[in-house]
Image: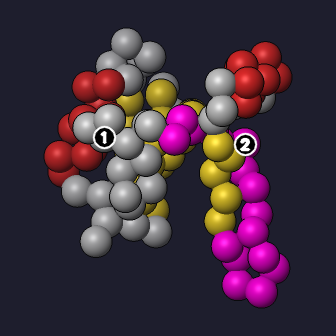
Amino acid sequence: MGVGPSEIEFVKELFATVGEISTRKMMGGLSIYANGKIFSVMRQDGRLYIKASGALAERLDAAGAMLFTYRFCNAGFIKFSYMTSKYNKRGN
């Protein structure tokens, strides 16, 4: 089961102060855009990831954030520049 209307409404409310929020469903999850630029993704289980690099990535890493990883066919796990807290699921 993928991301539904209630999760889309949740992220739009959560990030309303960031800019004009739009979303696109993708592989059961959700890509989240501010002013037309992707900055976050939501997995189908509700976990949010924020695009992070530089100082933000260092701060998130120091706080125990986890990288978004994806198992790609026979290539193993691929890491992306999106990070989350282990407590960053809707309702936590």
**Residue 52 in magenta stretch:** no
Residue stretch rendered in magenta on the structure: 71-86
Q: Name the residue under label 2.
A: 81
Q: Quadrant of residue 73?
A: bottom right
User: Mark 1 is on which residue type?
Assistant: Arg
Mark 2 vs mark 1: which is more N-terminal? Answer: 2
The picture places residue 54, in percent across and down from the top left corner, at 82, 23
Please tell me whether mark 2 or mark 1 is closer to you in this view.
1
- Across and down, in percent, residue 59 comes to 72, 19
> What residue is drawn where x is 79% and y is 17%?
55
What kind of residue is marked 2?
A: Ser
Tell me if residue 37 comes above or below residue 28 in the rendering. Answer: above
Disc number for residue 80: none
Q: Is residue 3 left or right of residue 63?
A: left
Q: Residues within 10 Å of mark 2 (few under 14, many from 20)?
A: few
Q: Mark 1 points at which residue?
A: 90
* Whole-number angstrom distance, CA of label 2 to CA of label 1: 21 Å
Q: How many labels does the image show?
A: 2
Left or right placement of residue 21 versus residue 70 in this view: left
> Compared to 87, does 27 lie above or below?
below
Q: Is residue 74 magenta?
A: yes
Please say which color scheme the image uses. Answer: secondary structure
Q: Position of residue 65 (x, y in %)?
A: 63, 35
Q: Is mark 2 on a helix, strand or loop?
A: strand
| Outermost residue toward the top in this view | 17
The residue drawn where x is 72% and y is 50% is 80
Q: In this view, does 44 lie to the left or right of 78?
A: left
- Asked if residue 24 can be seen in this view, the reply is no
Location of residue 58 in the rendering, given as x and y in whole percent from the top left corner: 78, 23
| Residue placed most toward the observer, 27 or 88 | 88
Q: Under tag 1, what secondary structure? A: loop
